[in-house]
Amino acid sequence: MVGKVTHKGRELTIALAPSIGVSDPIVHVCSAICRAAATYQRLQEQACNGYQDGQGNWDERAEKRAQAKEARLEKRITELCLELPLVAGKPIVPDFHGDPRGATVKLVMPDGRYDDLGQTGICVP
């Protein structure tokens, strides 16, 4: 099992339940996805605000570190999605967005379920 169960993990589990059901492993994986997605959201906010040092100059090293962390998070979330049950014989796939005004991580459901205005997938809280 992956880490501790979170409130947002339970929330995501409930959103996915009609497609994959509910079990302890699903709740743990959903909690891990939500934790990673919260960090991903923070990185997207940071990217919009810019990477500046104390003097207001562009901090290229901070930007590169953030981009590397973003890539690791995308990989982690993708791997966690593969731990969830298949839907109609296909895996749930994450969809990543850079605009922090909305959900930066959505789960694209093979059965077509969605809860976002763009009808992409299930928003990760």
Image: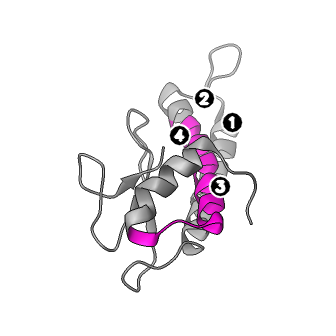
Q: Which residue is mark 4?
A: 41
The residues tagged by marks 2 and 3 sit, at their Cα atoms, a distance apart of: 27 Å
Q: Residue type at mark 3: give it.
A: Ala
Tag 2 or tag 1, which sits nearer the N-term?
2
Residue at 47% x, 69% y: name it.
21
Instruction: Judge the density around disc 4: few (<14), some (14-19), many (≥20) Cα neighbours within 10 Å.
Output: many
Q: Position of residue 49 (x, y in %)?
A: 51, 25
Name, please, the residue furthest toward the top: 55
Residue 95 in view here? no
Instruction: Judge the density around disc 1: few (<14), some (14-19), many (≥20) Cα neighbours within 10 Å.
Output: some
Residue 89, numbered label: none
Could you say which is closer to the camera, residue 33 or residue 67?
Answer: 33
The residues tagged by marks 1 and 2 sit, at their Cα atoms, a distance apart of: 6 Å
Are circles 1 and 2 on residues that touch, CB within 8 Å? yes
Residue numbers of the magenta segment: 19-44
Residue at 40% x, 39% y: name it.
99
As helix, strand or loop, the secondary structure at mark 4 comes to helix
Q: Which residue is mark 1?
A: 62
Tag 1 or tag 3, which sits nearer the N-term?
3
Q: Position of residue 30 (x, y in %)?
A: 58, 57
Q: Which residue is mark 3?
A: 32
Could you say which is closer to the camera, residue 6 or residue 107?
Answer: 6
Residue 51, numbered label: 2
The residues tagged by marks 3 and 4 sit, at their Cα atoms, a distance apart of: 14 Å
Q: Position of residue 50 (x, y in %)?
A: 54, 28
Name, please, the residue furthest toward the bottom: 89
Are circles 2 and 4 on residues that touch, CB within 8 Å? no
Give the mark toward the camera: 3 or 4.
3
The residues tagged by marks 3 and 1 sit, at their Cα atoms, a distance apart of: 25 Å
Residue 27, picture quadrant: bottom right
Could you say which is closer to the camera, residue 66 or residue 116?
Answer: 116
Residue at 57% x, 58% y: name it.
74
